[in-house]
Amino acid sequence: MRYVRDNIACLEGYTPGFQPKEADFIKLNTNENPYPPSPLSIKAMKAACEESIRKYPPPLADDFRDAASTVLHVKPEEIICGFGSDDILTIAVRTFCDQGDPVAFTYPSYSLYEILAGIQGAQSLIVDFPEDFSLPEELKDTGAKLTLLANPNAPSGTLIKPSTIKTLAAGLAGILLVDEAYVDFASDNCLRLIRECDNLVITRTFSKAYSLAGLRFGFAIANPHLVNEMMKVKDSYNVSAPGMAGAKAAIEDQKWLKKNVDQIINTRKTLSAGLESLGFHCQPSETNFVLAEAPENTVAKELYQRLFENKILVRYFNMPRLDHCLRITVGTDKQIARLLAVLKEILNEEEM
């Protein structure tokens, strides 16, 4: 007897980046921030644990919505919170898509999109990025109920201009969700389009720039009608009291955010230049990682393995268009110097 839905039984689940148990690894594989979160955030979480952990949290995370609306210049009713932005993505798919409905997204991009469509029993419509990772023309013609677009894109790190995304949203009959998980490291964002595009949803996370990946807190901004519909789908209490308190304090501490982001952007330049000098080809990154095509006459998977043997973790994807690349998180200056030194040693050995 089969107890599992057919679409679940044939589904391959999401594969997260490797998490080592040993503490001596240089971990550059899951795009975590190498710097600590705002001390105000830590203080707020501790206070929340002491004062309110025995009670259910506010179901709509009102304190965070009020704080975020002030910082981002939107209305509280235009915000919905979730257990990480992945939770928001799940809510969106469940809200806007019936079983069998088309969900469109680009490739290569965040692999969770296809999995979420599969869980819902929706139809995945995959549109290939061109070589330069510009917006594919075909994306506007899919007829999808929901179109998912990571911007900046992962794993390429590239950014599509908001003006181009505005044109895309205007041409779609369904919802356009722009996943801005890495936008704090980018030169532009789509937030201003919320008032111009009533079919636009923007998702954001505290896992990257805010150094709170372990907190699992994300949110979306959209017009209040869409937010109200998504509210029907979310779990009753889908963010914790410490999570809400920590995220509220973090988003209010924009000075701390800017300091860490500026440091990562500076180190990103060092990483890209160092990789290029070793023969890698790097995509122009607007994130906290760099997608680097391995030098000629080398094998990316072998470079990944050699780095692993030297206690340095990067991300290797055994997938078309990515299997000749390494995705490398921007760590501290010291970590990046070590990475580049080890890569130089490896490449010199291969030339001998």
Image (cartoon, helix red, strand yellow):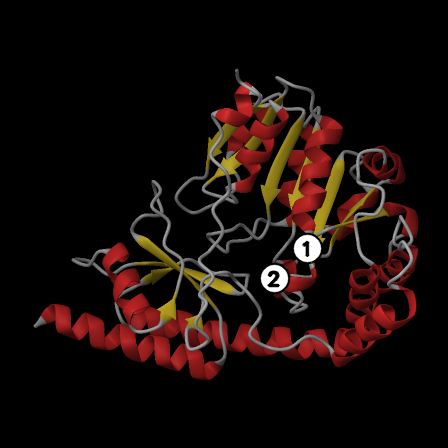
Residue at far left of view: 352
Q: Say if mark 1 contacts mark 2, CB within 8 Å.
A: yes
Residue 93 in percent (x, y) is at 68, 32
- Relative to 151, 16 lies left or right: left
- Relative to 45, 272 lies left or right: left
Amino acid on which the number 2 mark rests in the picture: Ala
Q: How many marks?
A: 2
Task: Write the residue at 28% across / 76% down.
Answer: 342
Q: Is residue 323 or residue 52 the one in the foreground?
A: 52
| Secondary element at tag 1 | loop
Residue 200 in percent (x, y) is at 74, 38
Q: Does residue 344 sit above or below 231 in this rendering?
A: below
Query: Which residue is tagged 1?
Result: 189
- Relative to 276, 109 lies left or right: right
Distance, label 1 to label 2, CA atoms, is: 7 Å
Task: Write the residue at 37% across / 49% down.
Answer: 317
Q: Would you call the spot at circle 2 few (<14 residues within 10 Å), some (14-19), or many (20 or more)?
A: some
Amino acid on which the number 1 mark rests in the picture: Asn
Q: Does residue 203 sit above or below 296 in this rendering?
A: above
| Secondary element at tag 2 | loop
Q: Would you call the spot at circle 1 few (<14 residues within 10 Å), some (14-19), or many (20 or more)?
A: many
Task: Write the residue at 88% across / 36% down.
Answer: 228
Which quadrant of the figure has residue 217?
A: bottom right
Residue 41 in percent (x, y) is at 78, 73
Q: Is residue 11 or residue 147 the one in the foreground?
A: 11
Give the number of the disc on residue 203.
none
Task: Write the residue at 60% across / 27% down.
Answer: 103
Query: Which residue is tagged 2?
Result: 186
Residue at far bottom of view: 334
Residue 66 in percent (x, y) is at 92, 59
Q: Does residue 64 sit above or below 15 in this rendering?
A: below
Q: Is residue 293 or residue 113 the one in the foreground?
A: 113
